[in-house]
Image (cartoon, rainbow, N blue to C red):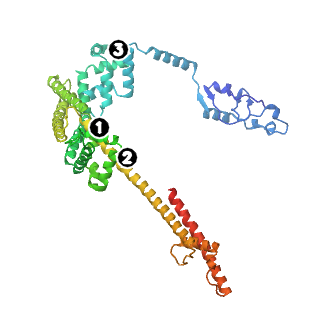
Amino acid sequence: MIELQKATISLNKHERCGFKVRCCASLFYSHYQGNCYISAVPKAPPAAEDLFEGSFWVKAKEDRFENKELFAKLTLTFSTQTKSKKDQEASEDKKNAQKKKVKELKVLDSKTSQNLSIFLGSNRMPYEEMKNVILEVNEKVLTENMVQSMLKLLPEQEQLNSLSEMKDEYEELAESEQFGVVISTVKRLKPRLSSILFKLQFDEQVNNIKPDLVAVKAACEELQKSEGFAKLLEITLLLGNFMNAGSRNAKAFGFSINYLCKLRDTKSADQKQTLLHFLAEICQEQYPEVMNFSEELTHVEKASKVSAETLQKNLDQMGKQIKDLEKDIETFPPPQSDRDKYVEKMTISFTSSREQFVKLKLMHENMEKQYEDLGKYFVFDPKKISPEEFFGDLNNFRNMFQQAAKENQKRKEAEEKIRRAKLAREKAEKEKEEKQKRMNAGQIPNINDDDETGIMDGLLEALQSGAAFKRKRGPRQAGNTRIRFLIYHVQGLLVLREYKMQKINILLSQ
């Protein structure tokens, strides 16, 4: 008898062997075989009321395929071994033991311990190996982030000292405190790490400082050598003195560089352009060599972003770190083991760093001297106006001048378009007046005249007024032929006139 069951598996006979069946077949029924039910989750199990005598499932005799070997193989293939009661109890005991293994902190507070645990988890390395990496100053393993994290997360020295006395209790300590026990054996740990961090960061510091020194010095030299910029200043001075004639600012000997940015504030009488646009137009039309002054000042933009205060601060900090490293090397205790390469490697690093620092200091002095000379050249106080401010104003003017030149070009193109449209309109009006005069005089325009528009209008007027028929008539047939040809010609000219008028309208609308 077939019994429809829910999707369950119950193999009582086979569970005695310690196995549980997981059946993955998509069967639509459950068939009872002794003490064993084999069934699977149906995709769309038929309901009992859906079955009728002619159904396949009513006639099916699956029990004829039943054999022990089949069920054994099925059990072995689709089963997972279930844990015996003893195994389950052992597993629970193990879990309870693991819970009991959570060790209490003896020295560190919970926050410090947690932060250290996170650090140790992200740097999976045996504690002894990490200790040796620090002693050896192994830059292949030590990274800037790693050293920074240790300096930030390591316990205070007093806590490290306490942990160093707990070697005998090592196994009873939490992992973070075990790490503290191992790492506390490194002499002068934090000063050592600070020096290593300086060594790792030194090249980056040099690469941040050196380009700024080069940019300011180069920008100073470019300004003093630029002929285009010198001419631009002379033209600006000339325009300013002319406009200020009769005022207290007349006959000035020079002006501050930041005045260049104020040229945009002086507008023309019609308010359509500024003094900056006028200056750009004069240079473009009469002194085209001045227009390239921007290309002669390639380092101005970079120099405009250099903060002299930050530059000095970074150099002072670098100098202090080098002095601290020198003192640290001189007072450092003898190597604590053969692996301790700190003094050896840091001495080499100190020598190299000091040489580069001396070069940077010299470059900085040359930059300051160059900027002082620029102050004398353009008559401003370099102590009151920083390079960032001076070159910032200059870079702004350079961009404004280029923009004004582009706007001038667009304005000229628009004016030229208006001029051409005006000429076309005037020409059309003039032709119309001449045509009207000819009509009033009763003249028939010459058919071969180049002014086709005038011919057309003249012929039309002549036909309408009858002037075309006032001449002495010839033979009737000849007169009719002449008039017919004349009409054809007028019709052609009408088409041509319409085409030309469309072109004029398009031009005027642009």
Residue at x-position 37% and y-position 51%: 408
Residue at x-position 73% and y-position 38%: 65
Q: Give above or below for 349 relative to 170.
A: below
Q: Give above or below for 256 relative to 476.
A: above
Task: Please tell me how crowded label 3 is: few (under 14), some (14-19), or many (20+) other residues with Cα within 10 Å.
Answer: many
- Tag 3 residue: 108
Circle 3 SS class: loop
Could you say which is closer to the camera, residue 227 or residue 91?
227
Q: Earlier in the sequence, mark 2 or mark 1?
A: 2
- Tag 1 residue: 305
Q: Is residue 428 left or right of residue 373?
A: right
User: In this view of the protein, can residue 57 be seen by the observer?
Assistant: yes
Q: In this view, does 485 lie to the left or right of 392?
A: right
x and y percentages locating residue 41 in the rendered image: 69, 32
Q: Quadrant of residue 465?
A: bottom right
Q: Residue 273 carries which label?
A: 2
Residue at x-position 26% and y-position 44%: 240
Q: In which quarter of the image is the N terminus?
A: top right
Q: Give above or below for 285 relative to 77.
A: below
Which amino acid type corresponds to the residue marked 2 in the rendered image? Gln
Q: Earlier in the sequence, mark 3 or mark 2?
A: 3
Q: Which residue lies furthest to the right in this view?
A: 53
